[in-house]
Image (cartoon, rainbow, N blue to C red):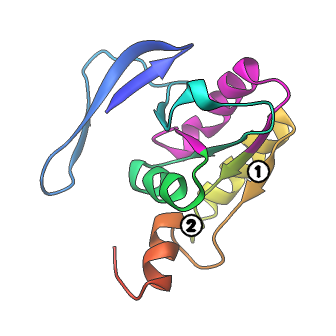
Amino acid sequence: MPIYNKKQLVSLQFVNESGEKKMLSGGLLKGSYCVLGHVETITPESILLICEGWATGCTLHDDTGFIVFVAFSAGNLKAVAIQVREHYPSHNIIVCGDNDASSVGQLAANDAALEIDGKVSIPPDLGDWNDYALMLKGEQS
């Protein structure tokens, strides 16, 4: 997956058949993201989403049609939120955090949303929005 920072390609993430993820050695991650959807379709009324992981981003984009910025980790949500807000200063931005037993995802999503005057969305059950969507469909991740 391509990873951008300030609209410049800065790294790649590779995922093998068993789901193991590796980042390009020497690539920039802090504040960097992958976009799902076509940014040229963003209008002033568009709602933009930010999430942690690729599968979550795919689910959110497929289910809502909204543009999704994938941050790749809870620790990167705030930096990505700042980047997105910089490019889209008047848009509604929702940070879609994970519901972690440790509260890491929830705290990171709340911190990111607070930083950019955005909103937060956390799934009601433990896991991420992809896990929740699969649960509603009766599947497992």
Q: Earlier in the sequence, mark 1 or mark 2?
A: 2
Residue 85 in the image: above or below residue 9:
below
> Residue 58 at what x, y percent from top left?
44, 53
Q: Nearer the viewer, residue 127 or 138?
A: 138
Other residues around mark 2 within 10 Å, as few (<14) / some (14–19) / many (≥20): some
> Residue 21 at what x, y percent from top left?
25, 44
Q: Nearer the viewer, residue 106 or 63?
A: 63
The reply, left or right, for residue 10 in relation to residue 49 is left
- Residue at the spot 87% in from the left edge and 38% down from the top edge: 117
Q: Is residue 141 magenta?
A: no
Q: Which residues are magenta?
A: 67-93
Query: Which image quarter: residue 111?
Result: top right
Other residues around mark 1 within 10 Å, as few (<14) / some (14–19) / many (≥20): many
- Residue at the spot 45% in from the left edge and 25% down from the top edge: 29
Which residue carries the number 1 mark?
110
Amino acid found under the numbered disc labelled 2: Asp
The secondary element bearing badge 2 is classed as loop
Residue 128 visible (yes or no)? no
> Residue 47 at what x, y percent from top left?
73, 44
Which residue carries the number 2 mark?
100
> Residue 35 at what x, y percent from top left?
49, 33
Q: In 3D space, how far apart are the residues under numbered discs 1 and 2 (Cα atoms)?
A: 13 Å
How many marks overall?
A: 2
The secondary element bearing badge 1 is classed as helix
Q: Nearer the viewer, residue 60 or 54?
A: 60
Amino acid found under the numbered disc labelled 1: Asn
- Residue at the spot 34% in from the left edge and 20% down from the top edge: 11
Residue 3 visible (yes or no)? yes
The reply, left or right, for residue 61 in relation to residue 22 is right
Tell me the quarter of the image containing the C terminus.
bottom left
Numbered label attached to residue 97: none
